[in-house]
Image: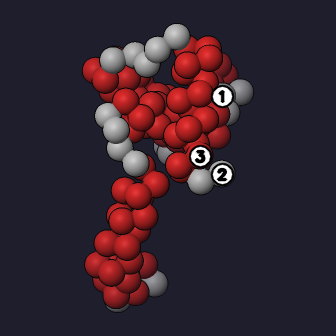
Amino acid sequence: MDIKNAQLEVDKWIKEHGVRYFNELTNMAQLTEEVGEVARIIARRYGEQSEKESDKNKDLGEELADVVFVVLCLANQTGIDLQASFDKKMGIKTERDHDRHHNNQKLK
């Protein structure tokens, strides 16, 4: 599924199940919360902190999907075509960073 269709799917879900979008500030707070949940899993599972028993069953993929869902909500409610923005950003990064990363001795 491409980003454009994902935005449409989220919008359809909101209209059918969610009543309406939360306002932008609420969604921003929700995004921060979801990113925090991703950070907690990564810090404990892949970082130096020990993983609590209660965190061992948490699904990183599901938490990342929560982040994507809220980002898509924010894009929808602010009128952003995230597919176009993403495509543009990939072009910028490709042009700007190709040689930089290939020439980075730390990455070799």
Per the model, the C-alpha gap separating discs 2 and 3 is: 6 Å
Q: Nearer the viewer, mark 1 or mark 3?
A: 3
Residue 51 location in percent, x, y?
59, 31
Q: Please name the amino acid that badge 2 sits on.
A: Met
Is label 2 in contact with label 3 (beta carbons under 8 Å)? yes
At x 59%, y 27%, the residue is 12
* Circle 1 residues within 10 Å: few <14, some 14–19, many ≥20: few
Does residue 23 appear in this view?
yes
Numbered label attached to residue 5: 3
Q: Nearer the viewer, mark 2 or mark 3?
A: 3
Q: Please name the amino acid that badge 1 sits on.
A: Lys
At x 46%, y 14%, the residue is 20
SS at mark 2?
A: loop
At x 40%, y 68%, the residue is 90
Q: Image quadrant of residue 8?
A: top right
Give whichever of discs 2 and 1 has the lower sequence position: 2
